[in-house]
Image (cartoon, coloured by chain):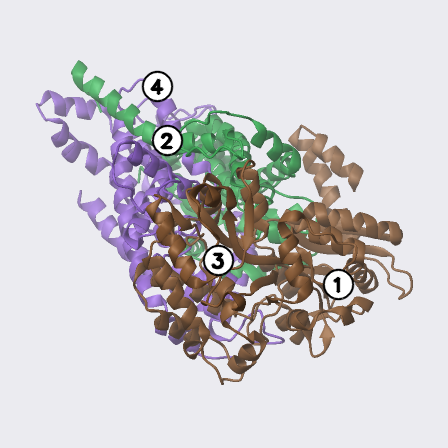
Chain colours: A brown, B purple, C green
């Protein structure tokens, strides 16, 4: 395969390339078969991951091969909507052994989430020693009926990312209460800039601030999810409305700057890097991007307060992707071995580093980089909150109606009503 | 390229001088049978079309009447018209109106600007082939990426290119994509930038059928530019207008990439069209039944509108 | 249109260049965005103070762009060839026969222009799986051959009806040609402008399509250009300068193709318009 590929790449004439690709393609589809004898993992192991983390997975795969030299690891990396691809492949029965899925989810909501995939028997439980180390707070994300179905990976903060250099220059401070947040907005406006550049124009941009503040507002997201599923709770009667009120007030105060609804996350990052905005509210992965855009400045990650008691404030930690095992995996032995391997200290540390986040499983081999040090401490001491589960349709409505809220077309209560209307019990 | 008709290749050795009128009806019938005799030529195409388009489409269409989703294990349940009622009780109403509005504006603007450019670049303009290429070039670019590019051009104050220019000129910034009305305008501008080249090419093709002598004669008769355009050129352009309007309508009702990249249906669902809703139902909600139901409605809608448009245009073509 | 006075010619030139300039502005912004380093935060409308080709180099070396160009060339050229062959074959009887069945079949093909692609997506994927073609370029070629067929049939049939007079075939038959030989030696050469138009429009569609190759090629190690470009799109962050740089690289072959066939595009449409 490899030699063929190199030949293909080198071929200049299209005609030669045509015949060679035909060969390469057909060998690719037949060589994927392998035998599993239940003992030492061997054969070909396939997997599908986001191309953004190719280097990280390749590194882990290389180490895995050192341990299990008989396994031939053939991972596939794709950009864009990997979830959509996994779903199509699962329906065609063509999905690889190891999948990229999303944590949590609900059984009723058809999506590539752990809860839905495991309840429909599409992914297999993981048999690895680390499954008993999954912290209680993360069990709803990766477990189903007391079995672990996903490698939880690493956590990143969902918080405010502040341009510390600019804040110091203007003599402003990172807020610790919601009133201070409002004050920061007004203060920034007086200096001719604005406080929070959000990706409100992106499909999944508006939800960031909501999730970042819900951690502080909602004491027990697991119970709320269960009550929602049982029909005992509603978004309209929940703290969500409170968050929408804060959102509205921040919008009215001009926290998000001019033309906020047309701004994409990338543009928001540029604004923070330039110092025309003081902060953005996003995931930790964005930190790397903003540092690259403004190498001379220092940036700080801080939780978004949602009440006036600074002690209430919790930082939201979320695992982005998780990895699961296809129930119809062609090589389940190797797949189990790989996920077991991923949960070991060394690979977990590599994984966390690649995702710019902190391992979920307790890990001695991991040393947090400076910008994540505070976050890692919070995770270790347990003062963080996982995110509750949001159904796909609720999430889409949430993003759209928050835009309506900022436009002034909807009240905080109406936003919650919209969410209730599309929730599947 | 001369502006007086298509040059016909004569390599086959057949003199193109044979006039249609010289063929008697009897001979003609025999020649027509040429097509009938070769009817089997259609088979490979029909087989591929049936296999790739028709069969899977009908399988997908069945889903419109079921609760088929990513969550379906085994066969989906028949739910009758539930998907349809659900679509119309939620988001489809305003989206239908918006889809029609968008298609209408795009088609009208495409044709006015496309025709104007064609007239301009059919005239004696220095380096007109280069200019034609430039106008056509956007058509070859991925429309999704074009959408993202225009997101930079019409970005918010401080980021967007146009707002930078406005700021440099001392003008007020404009919130292009954050305001539902202007966002719709930007979507239209983006679609136009990309598609007008195609319309222009079709009109240029149409203009090749306008004999220069005819126009010269009209000019000698003292007809002004607009008179000549209206009475000499326009009637001869009727087939080009028909094709442009037909393809424009079908394309206009299906516009997706640019909306998806620029606004994703926002802000606040206010640029959501049928095409973006089909995508949302399909990819975001994995609700294949609902997506199929809406897709079916869109296909029927396009079919009805294009049949109406086609018959109206054909009647006008015949009259002129 | 003849413009007589010197002034009006001057005016026409000014207007033509002015309006073309508007078409070029986004391209200028595109190039600007690709030429600036990551930490250059000047707005995209002004040229970067430190222009660099780094984005092009990174895009070329860190993605599968070089290999993807070959895959894209293979997929695009074979599927265009296939659709051209079967499309031309199918169009000929459709254009020449005036029977009800033939008209009906033509409209049946036209139906394909209306359908949103999501309808057939999953059933078609399963069909391809059953053929054992997933992960090969052949799945893509078959899919495109079917999807591009309606527009091709539309264009060639209208062209045949309007611009290829029966006289030629008739003359050929009198000379002793069989119907098939007449089709091959007489009709096909006359079709060249329409075929050129089809080549350009179909190849642009195939060249830029992202989702079809994503689901059919995934796992094969082969990628097409849009798949390579999308490798820079992440869950939370997206590297736009690299995307735009790859886009510019990927446009070169299509633009070259357009320049090659440009002559035919207008003729191809012109032929179809004579009805």
Q: Secondary structure at mark 4?
A: loop
Q: Chain of mark 2?
A: C
Report the quarter where the N terminus of chain C lies. Answer: top left
Query: Are tags 3 and 1 found on a single chain?
Result: yes
The residue beneath circle 4 is B127
On residue A204, the disc is: 3
Residue A154 is situated, as x and y percent measured from the top left of the image, at 68, 58
Marks 4 & 3, CB-CB < 8 Å contact: no
Query: Are tags 4 and 3 found on a single chain?
Result: no
The residue beneath circle 1 is A362
Q: Chain of mark 1?
A: A
Residue A385 is situated, as x and y percent measured from the top left of the image, at 59, 67
Marks 3 & 1, CB-CB < 8 Å contact: no
Q: Secondary structure at mark 2?
A: helix
Q: Residue at left 17%, top 16%?
A: C7
Q: Chain of mark 4?
A: B
- Of residues A277 and B143, the one drawn nearer to the viewer in this rendering: A277
Report the quarter where the C terminus of chain C lies. Answer: top left
Q: Residue at left 72%, top 65%?
A: A326
Q: CA distance from mark 2 to mark 4?
A: 19 Å
The residue beneath circle 2 is C25
Nearer to us of marks 3 and 1 is 1
Q: CA distance from mark 2 to mark 1?
A: 54 Å
Q: From what the image shows, is residue B184 above or below residue C70? A: below
- Local packing at callout 4 (Cα closer than 10 Å; few below 14, some 14-19, many 20+) is few
View extreme (right): residue: A39
Q: CA distance from mark 1 to mark 4?
A: 69 Å
Q: CA distance from mark 4 to mark 3?
A: 47 Å
Nearer to us of marks 1 and 4 is 1
Query: Are tags 2 and 3 found on a single chain?
Result: no
Q: Is residue B38 visible?
A: no
Nearer to us of marks 4 and 3 is 3
């Amino acid at each position: 395969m490899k030699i063929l590929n190199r030949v293909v790449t080198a071929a200049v004439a299209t005609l030669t390339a045509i015949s060679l690709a035909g060969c390469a393609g057909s060998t690719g589809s037949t060589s994927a078969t392998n035998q599993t004898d239940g003992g030492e993992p061997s054969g070909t192991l396939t997997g599908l991951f986001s191309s953004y983390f190719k280097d990280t997975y390749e590194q882990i795969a290389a180490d895995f091969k050192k341990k299990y030299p008989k396994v031939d690891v053939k991972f596939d990396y794709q950009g864009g909507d990997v979830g959509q691809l996994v779903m199509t492949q699962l329906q065609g029965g063509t999905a690889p052994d190891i999948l990229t899925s999303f944590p949590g989810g609900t059984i009723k909501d058809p999506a590539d989430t752990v809860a839905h995939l495991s309840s429909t028997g599409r992914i297999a439980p993981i048999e690895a020693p680390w499954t008993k180390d999954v912290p209680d707070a993360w069990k709803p994300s990766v477990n189903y009926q007391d079995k672990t179905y996903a490698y939880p990976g690493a956590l990143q903060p969902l918080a405010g990312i502040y341009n510390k250099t600019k804040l110091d220059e203007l003599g402003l401070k990172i807020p610790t209460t919601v009133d201070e947040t409002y004050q920061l907005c007004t203060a920034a406006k007086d200096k001719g800039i604005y406080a929070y550049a959000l990706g409100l124009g992106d499909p999944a941009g508006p939800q960031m601030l909501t999730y970042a503040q819900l951690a502080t507002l909602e004491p027990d997201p697991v119970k709320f999810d269960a009550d929602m599923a049982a029909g005992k709770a509603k978004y309209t009667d929940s703290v969500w409305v409170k968050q929408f009120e804060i959102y509205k007030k921040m919008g009215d105060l001009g926290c998000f700057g001019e033309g906020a609804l047309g701004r994409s996350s990338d543009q928001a990052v540029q604004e923070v890097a330039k110092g025309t905005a003081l902060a953005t509210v996003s995931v930790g992965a964005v930190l790397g991007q903003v540092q690259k855009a403004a190498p001379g400045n220092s940036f700080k990650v801080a939780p978004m307060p949602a009440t006036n008691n600074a002690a209430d404030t919790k930082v939201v930690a979320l695992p982005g992707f998780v990895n699961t095992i296809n129930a119809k995996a062609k090589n389940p032995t190797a797949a189990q071995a790989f996920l077991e391997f991923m949960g070991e200290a060394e690979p977990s540390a590599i994984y966390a580093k690649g995702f710019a986040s902190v391992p979920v499983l307790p890990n001695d081999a991991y040393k947090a980089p400076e910008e994540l040090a505070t976050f890692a401490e919070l995770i270790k001491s347990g003062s963080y909150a996982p995110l509750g589960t949001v159904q796909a349709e609720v999430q889409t409505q949430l993003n759209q109606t928050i835009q309506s809220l900022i436009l002034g077309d909807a009240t905080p209560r109406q936003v919650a009503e919209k969410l209730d209307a599309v929730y599947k019990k | 390229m001369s502006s007086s008709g298509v040059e016909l290749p004569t390599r086959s050795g057949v003199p193109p001088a044979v006039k249609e009128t010289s063929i008697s009806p009897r001979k003609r019938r025999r020649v027509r049978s040429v097509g009938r005799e070769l009817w089997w030529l259609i088979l490979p195409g029909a087989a591929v079309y049936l296999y790739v388009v028709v069969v899977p489409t009908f399988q997908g269409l069945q889903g419109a009447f079921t609760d088929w989703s990513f969550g379906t294990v085994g066969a989906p349940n028949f739910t009758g018209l539930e998907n349809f009622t659900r679509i119309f009780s939620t988001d489809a109403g305003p989206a239908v109106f918006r889809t029609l509005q968008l298609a209408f504006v795009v088609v009208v603007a495409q044709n006015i600007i496309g025709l104007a450019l064609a007239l301009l670049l059919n005239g004696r303009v220095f380096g007109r082939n280069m200019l034609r290429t430039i106008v056509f070039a956007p058509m070859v670019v991925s429309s999704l990426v074009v959408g993202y590019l225009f997101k930079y051009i019409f970005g918010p104050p401080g980021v967007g290119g146009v707002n930078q220019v406005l700021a440099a000129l001392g003008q007020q910034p404009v919130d292009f994509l954050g305001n539902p009305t202007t966002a719709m305008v930007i979507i239209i501008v983006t679609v136009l930038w990309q598609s007008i080249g195609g319309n222009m090419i079709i009109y240029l093709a149409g203009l090749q059928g306008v004999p220069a002598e005819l126009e010269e004669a009209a000019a000698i008769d003292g007809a002004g530019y607009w008179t000549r355009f209206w009475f000499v050129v326009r009637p001869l352009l009727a087939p080009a207008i028909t094709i442009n309007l037909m393809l424009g309508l079908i394309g206009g009702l299906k516009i997706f990439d640019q909306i998806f990249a620029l606004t994703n249906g926002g802000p606040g669902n206010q640029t959501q069209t049928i095409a973006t809703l089909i995508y949302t139902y399909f990819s975001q909600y994995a609700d294949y039944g609902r997506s199929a139901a809406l897709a079916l409605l869109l296909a029927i809608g396009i079919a009805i509108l294009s049949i109406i448009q086609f018959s109206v245009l054909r009647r006008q073509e015949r009259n002129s | 249109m003849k413009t007589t006075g010197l002034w009006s010619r001057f005016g026409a030139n000014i207007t033509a260049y002015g309006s073309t300039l508007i078409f070029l502005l986004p391209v200028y912004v595109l190039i600007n965005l690709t030429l600036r380093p990551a930490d250059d935060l000047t707005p995209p409308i002004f040229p970067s103070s430190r222009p660099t080709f780094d984005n092009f180099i990174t895009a070329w070396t860190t993605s599968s762009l070089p290999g993807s160009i070959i895959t894209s060339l293979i997929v695009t050229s074979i599927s265009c060839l296939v659709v051209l062959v079967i499309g031309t074959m199918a169009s000929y009887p459709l254009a020449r026969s005036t029977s009800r069945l033939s008209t009906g079949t033509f409209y049946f093909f036209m139906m394909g222009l209306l359908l949103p692609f999501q309808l057939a997506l999953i059933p078609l994927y399963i069909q391809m799986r059953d053929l054992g073609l997933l992960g090969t370029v052949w799945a893509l070629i078959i899919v495109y051959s079917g999807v591009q067929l309606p527009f091709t049939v539309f264009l060639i049939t209208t062209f045949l009806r309007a611009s290829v007079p029966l006289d030629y075939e008739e003359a050929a038959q009198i000379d002793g040609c069989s119907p098939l030989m007449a089709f091959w030696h007489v009709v096909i050469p006359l079709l060249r402008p329409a075929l050129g138009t089809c080549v350009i429009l179909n190849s642009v569609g195939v060249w830029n399509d992202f989702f079809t190759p994503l689901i059919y090629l995934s796992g094969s190690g082969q990628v097409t250009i849009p798949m390579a470009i999308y490798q820079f799109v992440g869950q939370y962050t997206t590297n736009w300068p690299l995307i735009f740089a790859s886009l510019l690289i990927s446009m070169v072959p299509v633009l070259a193709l357009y320049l090659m066939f440009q002559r035919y595009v207008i003729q191809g449409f012109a032929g179809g318009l004579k009805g």
